[in-house]
Amino acid sequence: MSGALPFLAIGLLLLMLLSVVWILRSSAEKGSLSESWEHDGKSIAGFHLDALPQELTERIFGSQDWDFVSAQGTAGLRRLFLQQRTALALAWIRAARANANKLIHTHVTAARTSSRLEPLVELRVGADYLLFVVLCQLIMLAIWLRGPIHLGRLIGYTDTLSERLHELIVRVLPAELASENSNRQS
């Protein structure tokens, strides 16, 4: 087992480098920061406004509604509930990933024009983003295999990681963009 650990570390490093290259290539097609900022008309704070409120997120991935439906309903009602709840959970994951993608593309575009890059911070941003994407894929797999019920702890960790990624990126953004995001709503 210990012999496989260096190969695993090298593989993870290569995956992280590949994702950074992919992000750089895809954001190069989007144009300059000022063009994309004016085109979107949004700030980074707006990226999270599309996300569901925390109470609703807890409700989607919690077991309270499922306990009620399973105690009251028939097998058809339980199946319909799970189908609808699965659709909501998958939509939540897609929205969270879309927000993170917009955030990282904005960061990469701003980093290209910045003269004060900090390699360790950039590496941490890349690692956090990669971990976030992997967690989203893991959550989607768990939803497809088991359903969205009882995933609250994993979703909570993913939300925390998303917040950390947002705070880290806002901290290193140019001053004119960071000032727009100082009043971010959760």
Image (tube, grey):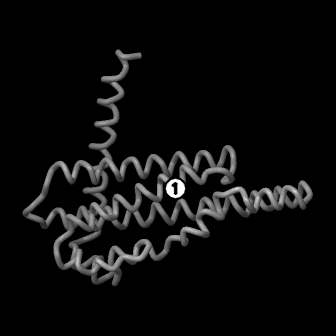
| 6 sits to left or right of 47 | left
| 53 sits to left or right of 119 | right
| Viewer-nearest residue: 171 or 12 | 171
| 88 sits to left or right of 34 | right
Query: Quadrant where the C terminus lies?
Result: bottom left
| Crowd around label 1: few <14 · some 14–19 · many ≥20 (10 Å) | some
Q: Is residue 156 above or below residue 173?
A: above
Image location of residue 48, percent across then percent down: 43, 72
Image location of residue 106, percent across then percent down: 28, 68
Query: Quadrant where the N terminus lies?
Result: top left
Q: Which residue appears at 28% of the width and 79% of the height? A: 37
The quadrant holding residue 91 is: bottom right
- Count of all numbered marks drawn on residues in the image: 1
Residue named by callout 1: 156
| 4 sits to left or right of 143 | left
Q: Which residue appears at 87% of the width and 57% of the height? A: 71
